[in-house]
Amino acid sequence: MEGARRRAALQTAAVTLGLAPLAWLGVRALRGDLGANPIEAVTHATGLAALRLLLVALAITPSRRWLGLRWLAPLRRTFGLLAFGYACLHLLTYVVLDQFFDWQAILEDVAKRPYITAGFFAFLCLSPLAATSTRAMVRRLGRRWKPLHRLAYVAAIAAVVHFLWLVKKDTREPLTYAAVLALLLAGRWPQKKSKTALAARGETAS
Amino acid sequence: MRTRPERIPESEITPRDVYLRRRELLVAGALAAGTALLPRLSLAAEVPAHGTIPNVKPGPFGTDEEKTSLEDVTSYNNFYEFGTDKSDPRKLAGSLRTRPWKVAIEGEVEKPAVVDLDALLEPHALEERVYRHRCVEAWSIVVPWVGFPLGDLLKRFQPTSQAKFVEMTTLLDPEQMPGQRRDVLEWPYVEGLRIDEAMNPLAILAVGMYGEVLPNQNGAPLRLVVPWKYGFKSVKSIVRIRLTRTQPQTSWNRTAPNEYGFYSNVNPDVDHPRWSQKRERRIGEFLKRPTLPFNGYAEQVASLYKGMDLRKNF
């Protein structure tokens, strides 16, 4: 009983944290504080929140492994879904506010502008993950669930590339995210390696 | 016998702060006396360091489109010398000292000189020019500049027959321009025009906008405005104007030659490799509007590029 209550409190805290960027954006909008180009400000804020939350979601497994923070495990899905939520807002901002349903311009952007191609690809990678995030889907997919959800890393790489290709010259910020992502990827490496090593020696449980 | 030292009356003792500034005050006094002797021409430009600019006449080529708010134009700036975020220049440009300011006019001119800004501006009558300003990032603004034709200034220094291009350079001083402490671009910022572009009456040097002296973040105290080209061509805080025989190496062109051409005329038919140039967002508006060839100034400047392939010479 105590454990369940603690888990619920943890989820509430995570969701509150995750919604903070949206709340802040709302406050700025109400105060008329979005600057000379509000559409650009909303696009940047939602995109940044999506990338950050995706990286937070991807940090959970390494934290469990290296810092022993097992209680974090259920938050992976929470942060992943929050990231997808912001990615949806980001895409909607682009389609509705920025391009105002100019489908020809949108198609041209996706096909011809590498940074938009990368961003759209990241969104495509995240969508099936969100769709298969329910407990029922986890059960239905069984052993196929885990390899499918490795797409989260592909999405994160594409999102960082999207950011990197978008900036004109000052690449400090996107490179910071690239470094964090590289660290997170490196944090998973040893286990996979040892598994293959075990498999090679025929010592796996099967 | 002991004599008492003569007492100096209190009134004759120089206050300490005045004593410490004695050299400064002497110079100021001499300058004031000197300026009093100069004749005052009624047409001459008198540009104060701050505030309203007097005697500004309406100039040609003005648009009657709605002007962008001063707030937006002074808070949304690409001026990498003060940081790469568009909100940085307003926060950081306070450190720029715009007086005294000298401008060197050199290269292929009969009368090269290093001129103090006030003397440089003096012979020019100031006009207000309400221009569209289109950024390469697909947003645009409408700004009432205060300035005078660049060609008028160049003629004073008598370009030689060899002068084919004009190269203009921004101040280099990382002390005043914190953005220059990092190598985002190769400093100082350099831009350039072909001589016939520079002589076109549409090209102006601006010292103000909205009737006031240019705010630092908008390129004080002297900047170029070439409204038919993308915004980055309009170099800010100019300290050197050099006439050359060969095409200048301009900053963005050097950084990414496939993205930023030397000409960089506004052209909806030539996309930037990373985004479309067909439409633009006018700051303050919701729907994008179509971008016009030469930013709507084709009548004035299209003839400059007759016979040129503008896809190649983008």
Image (cartoon, coloured by chain):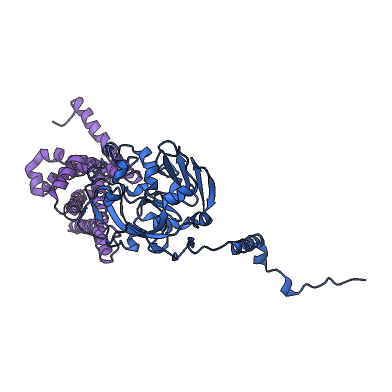
Chain colours: A purple, B blue
Q: Position of residue B131 (x, y in %)?
A: 32, 56
Q: Is residue B83 left or right of residue B29?
A: left
Q: Quarter holding the N terminus of chain B?
A: bottom right
Q: Nearer the viewer, residue B272 or B88?
A: B272
User: Residue at image x 27%, y 39%?
Assistant: B310
User: Residue at image x 33%, y 46%?
Assistant: A173
| Image quadrant in which you'd find residue B256 | top left
Q: Quarter holding the C terminus of chain B?
A: top left
Q: Is residue B84 left or right of residue B29?
A: left
User: Residue at image x 26%, y 64%?
Assistant: A27
Q: Nearer the viewer, residue B44 or A38?
A: B44
Examine the rendering and report whether any part of residue B171 can be seen. no
Q: Position of residue B70 (x, y in %)?
A: 35, 63
Q: Is residue B24 left or right of residue B213?
A: right
Q: Position of residue B63 (x, y in %)?
A: 29, 59
Examine the rendering and report whether any part of residue A149 can be seen. yes
Q: Nearer the viewer, residue A13 or A168?
A: A168
Q: Position of residue B196 (x, y in %)?
A: 38, 43
Q: Is residue B34 above or below residue A129?
A: below
Q: Is residue A159 above or below residue B21?
A: above
Direction right: furthest residue: B1
